[in-house]
Image (cartoon, grey):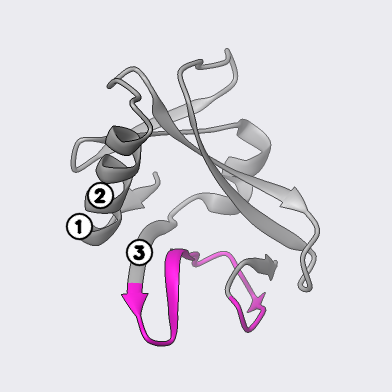
Amino acid sequence: MITVSDKAKEKVERLRSDAGLNESFRLRASVAGGGCSGLSYKLDFDDEVKPMDQEFEDKGVRVVVDMKSFLYLAGTELDFSDGLNGKGFFFNNPNASRTCGCGESFSV
């Protein structure tokens, strides 16, 4: 399961609205090779669910994850910060053994 914090929910809804996207667009979370720790997180909106995708809903936010990425993201909470130490989405990932200083990449 992928969970979403209250702050992340508010930001996702605002971004979807600002982009003029309807409710059929889900938040797609994925993992790609790269970043200073080896793997990096990606977020985007997508209105297509592929046959092997895992789909979750938390606090009204629908999240889709491809099966390969789900192996790295299982149990992760998506959060959002607008504080002085950084602004943006971040992943509270229990599977990450190491993260980089910016929080955009990790390793397992």
Residue tagged 1: 6
Q: Amino acid at mark 3?
A: Phe
Q: Secondary structure at mark 2?
A: helix
Q: Disc 2 versus disc 3: distance between alpha carbons? A: 8 Å
Q: Residues within 10 Å of mark 3 (few under 14, many from 20)?
A: many
Residue numbers of the magenta segment: 82-102
Query: Image quarter for residue 78?
Result: bottom left
Q: Are marks 1 and 3 in contact (CB under 8 Å)?
A: no
Q: Disc 1 versus disc 3: distance between alpha carbons? A: 9 Å
Q: Residues within 10 Å of mark 1 (few under 14, many from 20)?
A: some
Q: Is residue 106 left or right of residue 21?
A: right
Q: Earlier in the sequence, mark 2 or mark 3?
A: 2
Q: Which mark is residue 40?
A: none
Q: Amino acid at mark 2?
A: Lys
Write the residue at 22% across / 51% down. Answer: 10
Give residue 68's position: percent from left, percent from top. 68, 38
Query: Image quarter for residue 27?
Result: top left
Q: Are marks 1 and 2 in contact (CB under 8 Å)?
A: yes
Q: Is residue 97 magenta?
A: yes
Write the residue at 38% across / 58% down. Answer: 77
Residue tagged 2: 9
